[in-house]
Amino acid sequence: LAAADRIKQTVVAEEVDPSRVEAAVEERMRALGMERAERFGWQNTYTFAKALGEMLIWRERGNLPVAVVRPSIVESSLTQPAAGWLEGIRMVDPLILAYGKGQLAGFCVNSEGVVDLTPSDFVVNATLACMPRCASRNRLEVFQVATSTVNPLRWGQLITMVQAHFANYPMVDREGNDIALAPVQVFGSKGRFVLHTWWRYGWPS
């Protein structure tokens, strides 16, 4: 907050358009957050903020028993309330939909790498199961809810399933025609992905 106040004072002192103040503060705070996260070994502000939240709970919990549930990537449900249910489009979904619409040619992944997806109903059930376990213990316990150790899903498997799905159930364009898709390209390195993207979208027409 002190940093935000200093930024606002600097912007006002320079007589910048007030409408730009919030944008300047937001951008600077984002940069400061990333700088602080990297300093303490976190790869981004998302994981850093979650860690801060857990530390705050640990400090302020008093005598209250607490369960910290850490799920991996939460995706659509397996059975409850219905198979495939998910509220909103997030996590891996935007990438899958972009491919289905023909907007994304491939993924920058290791085909043998594990993508840890956990059905949302599994996360709910695990959270409920933690409650009676922690109720009788005056301490903070951490529970990891993930699938990669027991039932790993590899990127290559996921890509194969995505391709099969859109081959059987293609999305349609504004005219109602099926969107034809090329096979998914797998880019084994960031350099290959960047080069492909530049060649496809950045090369002068």
Image (cartoon, rainbow, N blue to C red):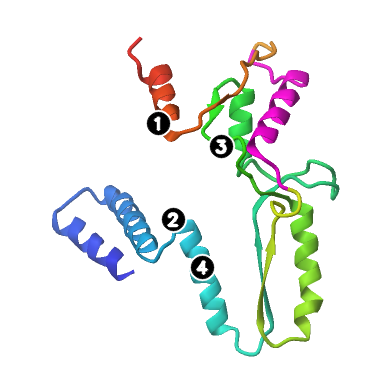
Above-or-below relation of 89 to 171: below
Answer left or right for 150 relative to 194. Answer: right
Write down the residue under mark 1.
Answer: 191
Answer left or right for 30 relative to 58. Answer: left
What predominant SS class does the magenta segment belong to? helix
Residue at 25 percent across and 60 percent down: it is: 8
Give the position of the C terminus as an image quadrant.
top left
Nearer to me, 174 or 50: 50
Nearer-N-terminus badge (4/2) = 2
Nearer-N-terminus badge (4/1) = 4
Q: Position of residue 122 (x, y in %)?
A: 78, 56
Q: What amino acid is labelled 3 in the image?
A: Asn
**Disc 4 and disc 2: Cα gap in Å?**
12 Å
Write down the residue under mark 3.
Answer: 110
Residue at 28 percent across and 51 percent down: it is: 24
Which structural element holds mark 3? loop
Q: Is residue 159 magenta?
A: yes
Nearer-N-terminus badge (2/3) = 2
Residue at 53 percent across and 83 percent down: it is: 59
Write down the residue under mark 2.
Answer: 43
**Disc 2 and disc 3: Cα gap in Å?**
19 Å
Answer left or right for 123 relative to 2. Answer: right
Marks 3 and 1 in Cβ contact (< 8 Å) = no
Q: What amino acid is labelled 2 in the image?
A: Gln
Q: How many marks?
A: 4
Nearer-N-terminus badge (2/1) = 2
Which portion, as a residue range, is magenta?
152-174
Which structural element holds mark 4? helix
Write down the residue under mark 4.
Answer: 51
Q: Is residue 104 visible?
A: no
Marks 4 and 2 in Cβ contact (< 8 Å) = no
Q: Based on the displayed image, in which of its 4 quarters is residue 36 positioned?
A: bottom left
